[in-house]
Image: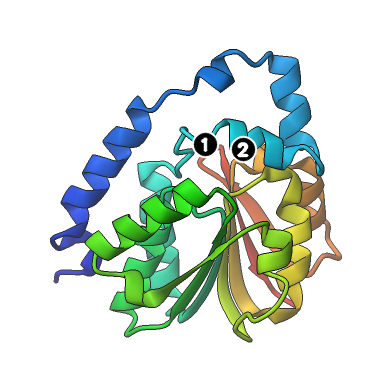
Amino acid sequence: MTNTLTTAPLPALLERLFAQAASATSPALAAMSQEERARLMLSKTGYVEFYSRLKELWLPVSRDTGTLLYMLARSTRASSIVEFGTSFGISTLHLAAALRDNGGGRLITSEFEPSKVAKAREHLTEGGLIDLVEIREGDALRTLAAGLPDPVDLLLLDGAKALYRDVLALLEGRLRPGALIIADNADDSPEYLAYVRAPASGFLSVPFAGDVEVSLKVG
């Protein structure tokens, strides 16, 4: 049985994009001390500066996490997906492929770096999936504050780590019972982890593969 993820043009496109991501470099990151990097990454005011300085880096999900996103969206028959952090669109391609194979739907994704928005649109068009995706340019605390589907079946958090808890707060009331939240590099967001792992949070949450947190809305 074929699926969009394993059918042309997606495999060749994703192979090329993962290779480009692996070879990308950032002089700004190389010049940044570990202390400054940690401070900006965890700051709720410095994240725009931090990620703007790293705009050459792709910061994608791993290949395995991309496949996991597709599998989770397919297995839950998701038709409405929200993504925080488009970057160059690798994770978006995996999620949109699942929507296509689920029979259609809508993926709303947010990215504040204009050059990445333009490239993500190119990649989604090349992959034949742009019709399923709405890319909102700007700070997610504004772009995801209104005009979202209700209910939301799946939420991917893969943007500024300091905002994971705040973005979840925007979406939490729209998540249907049984909705999944996947947070990439969640260890860099201790506030978020403390919330979703709390017994009274309304979520069941477990770490996966060392750098991903998968949470289920049970309440």
Q: Can residue 71 be seen in this view?
A: yes
Task: State how many labels appear.
Answer: 2
Callout 1 amino acid: Lys
Identify residue for label 2: 51
Q: Residue at x 81, y 46 (%)?
A: 191
Please provide percent x and percent y for residue 127. 24, 62
Dot 1 crowding, Cα within 10 Å, few <14, some 14–19, many 20+: some
Please provide percent x and percent y for residue 76. 46, 76
Q: Disc 2 on helix, strand or loop?
A: helix
Quadrant of the snapshot with the C terminus: bottom right
Callout 2 amino acid: Tyr
Identify residue for label 1: 55
Q: Residue at x 42, y 80 (%)?
A: 77
Quadrant of the snapshot with the N terminus: bottom left
Dot 2 crowding, Cα within 10 Å, few <14, some 14–19, many 20+: some
Q: Residue at x 69, y 24 (%)?
A: 37
Q: Is residue 103 left or right of residue 49?
A: left
